[in-house]
Amino acid sequence: MKKFAKVFFMIIVILIIYAPILILAVYSFTDSANIGPIHGFSLNNYKTLFTSTELTEMIAGTVILAFGSAIISTILGTLGALGAFYSKKFPQMGIGAMNQVPVVNADVVTGFSICILLIAVFGIDKSTYLPLVIGHVVLSAPFVYLSVVPKLKQMDNSLYEAAMDLGASSATALRKVIIPQIAPGIVSGFGLAVTLSLDDYFITTYTKPATFDTISTYVVNATKGSQTDIKTALWALSTIIFVIVILVVVVMNLKASIKDKA
């Protein structure tokens, strides 16, 4: 009975989490203009998604921003983690504490702060993409730091010391000894940075140029409009994003399973 109860509870939790997404996926393959009666199978939503210039440009801009800011965040977060790890106790604690502030801080506060600092104080034109990129880096870099630090603590530091004893320079030892050991943390941090950028709404809203939209800001604005075909095309976009996430998770788990068996 206990085993049955655990399985039943797990099924209920999974249904609560995934049922709304699965229902949305079903509606993305219909002609329905609203959530309600299903009017039949159709691929019109996917056709609109891939043929609408407005949608394709928005998606491309979102992806470029996500990967561009993630690369910068990964570099800064990794360097910050390395610097903190090899610092003395009190500087290390200070860096760790300061890194926690953007993590627990509300996105709306971060967005307002960046907007005021860069635009009002430094006079940077909001029509440029600089405030937007900085905002996403501020959002993502602390999470990269948190992904890399545990790997630094787990690595065999004697290998680094041995490389130095054998004549390797600090840069060479970093590149050939430390980076390979913490690479999983760097990759995880990069993936998290991409996800955070794709998902962000508040920071993007306050720092983006008026003519630029990411998926998050576009979806919010589209739900307020009257273009039904655009709204329903976003159901298709949501389904594709969900499928991509599932595939990435499955591939990562398979690779981890194969590595464990090896």
Image: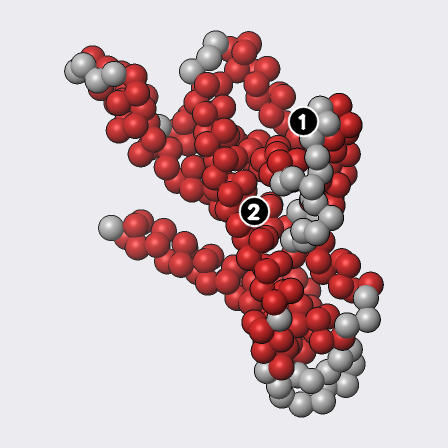
Q: Which residue is at the front of the view, 178 or 206?
A: 206
Do residues under tags 2 and 1 come within 8 Å of each other at their CB atoms?
no
Amino acid type of the residue that numbered disc 2 sits on in the rendered structure: Leu
How far apart are the two marked residues, 2 and 1, measured between alpha carbons? 23 Å
Report which residue position mark 2 lands on: 65
Name the image colouring: secondary structure
Mark seen at residue 101: 1
Measured as percent of width and height from the top left, residue 152 is found at 41, 27
Q: Nearer the viewer, residue 233 or 38?
A: 233
Q: Is residue 209 above or below residue 9?
A: above
Q: Position of residue 233 (x, y in %)?
A: 66, 72
Compared across the picture, whether 37 is left or right of 61 comes to right
Disc 2: CA contacts within 10 A as few (<14), some (14-19) or many (>=20) = many
How many residues crowd mark 1 within 10 Å: few (<14), some (14–19), many (20+)?
A: few
Which amino acid type corresponds to the residue marked 1 in the rendered image? Val
- In the rendered image of this protein, does residue 207 appear above or below residue 87? below
Q: Nearer the viewer, mark 2 or mark 1?
A: 2
Q: Tag 2, which secondary structure? A: helix
